[in-house]
Image: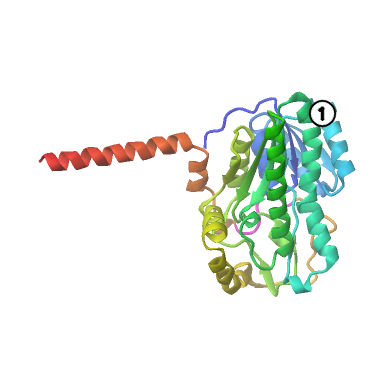
Amino acid sequence: MVESSVTSQVVVITGASAGVGRATALAFARQGASVALIARGLDGLAGAKRDVEAAGGRALVFSIDVADAAAVERAAEETERAFGAIDVWVNNAMTSVFSPFVDMTIEEFVRVTAVTYLGVVNGTMAALKRMSKRNRGTIVQVGSALAYRSIPLQSAYCGAKAGVRGFTDSLRCELHHDKSRVTLTMVHLPALNTPQFGWVKSRLPRKAQPVPPIFQPEVAARAILYAARSTRRELYVGFPAWLAIVAGAKLAPGLADRYLGRTGYDAQQTDEPVTEGATNNLFTPVSGDHGSHGTFDTRSRSTSLVAEAATHRGLLAAAVVGSVAAALFLLRAKRSR
């Protein structure tokens, strides 16, 4: 994927201490951007700051909870005071609980919703407050295939991601009405090898895992970087995300319900039993710097042909036209013999 320059841009990323947020911060830093890093964990934020600066970017850290609207607003204000006008805001922070719905508590549901849905609302509000005045800027909502096609054992997370999609679609209509030049885009991700599966709260008997096939977080980061400089409404990253959205949610949702009812429990668990006394990050961050990758490196893909095609539609169209032209030429040559 060819990356155009974002040198001198000011970028805010939530959930930046690990996983997709950490990989995205590094991708922007390599382009020379100034990056404000928002997350709760101090260890991870310190590591992300080192990564950004080593890659050539500037970094500013905010140890805050995105569910706290006032704290998010303060972070936006301090970012502009330190770096200047915010060009790109990436809403990436999330949390989840792996559990049958009947075993969930209302406190868990509220917490997942507050971070994964309202955290996006809070970030969007802080970004748009500033971007609207200048009539420019880009807000990237990090979505998921699960925003369209829910799976078992993650009812709170799936509901929150679907809520983000509904909220984003509504806001996009308002921006069109106002003839705003602020860009609002949503990037829907596949299963990724991030640390969240090691610290997510879970009631499953075996360790949680992303539903295979699994992709490295850099695949997501490259797509987010592309979305930040494009005007695309939505971007599906990876064939599994495309398949889940197009087939599982739009063409045959009833069939997908039954299929996931049969396979969705095992697909989200490894063969290893859960470690007794393991900590989770639902209400408090897990200590330590966990980086971008989880524990599934050997099973994860570093590239996605679908993602490459989605971000190179002009080249893809040229290739298709070229292939058709070549096929017609060969057909005519064969007939003329």
Q: Which residue does the image show at 70% across and 33% down from the upper left? A: 177
Q: Residue 50, image x and y in percent?
A: 74, 38
Mark 1 element type: helix
Per the image, is 295 magenta?
yes
Colouring used for the render:
rainbow
- The quarter of the picture where residue 284 lies is bottom right
Q: Which residue is mark 1?
A: 80
Q: Which residue does the image show at 72% across and 59% down from the upper left? A: 159
Question: Which residue is nearer to you in this view: 191 or 243?
Answer: 243
Per the image, is 108 magenta?
no
- The quarter of the picture where residue 81 lies is top right
- The quarter of the picture where residue 207 lies is bottom right
Where 197 sits versus 317, above or below?
A: below
Where 177 sits versus 303, above or below?
A: above
Main structural element of the magenta stretch: helix, strand or loop? Answer: loop
State the extent of the magenta-drawn residues as a range: 290-296
Left-right relation of 298 to 53: left
Image quadrant in which the C terminus is located: top left
Around disc 1, counting alpha carbons within 10 Å, would you say few (fewer than 14), some (14 to 19), or many (20 or more)?
some
Q: In this orientation, does residue 23 appear?
A: yes
Question: Which residue is nearer to you in this view: 129 or 194?
Answer: 129
Where 314 sits versus 285, above or below?
A: above
Amino acid type indicated by mark 1: Glu
Q: Which residue does the image show at 72% across and 72% down from the upper left? A: 100
Question: Which residue is nearer to you in this view: 336 or 267?
Answer: 336
Q: Residue 263, image x and y in percent?
A: 57, 71
Question: Which residue is nearer to you in this view: 212 or 145?
Answer: 145
Left-right relation of 318 to 183: left
Q: In this orientation, does residue 287 appear?
A: no
Q: Residue 330, image x and y in percent?
A: 21, 40
Residue lying at the far left of the rendered structure: 337
Q: Residue 319, image x and y in percent?
A: 38, 38
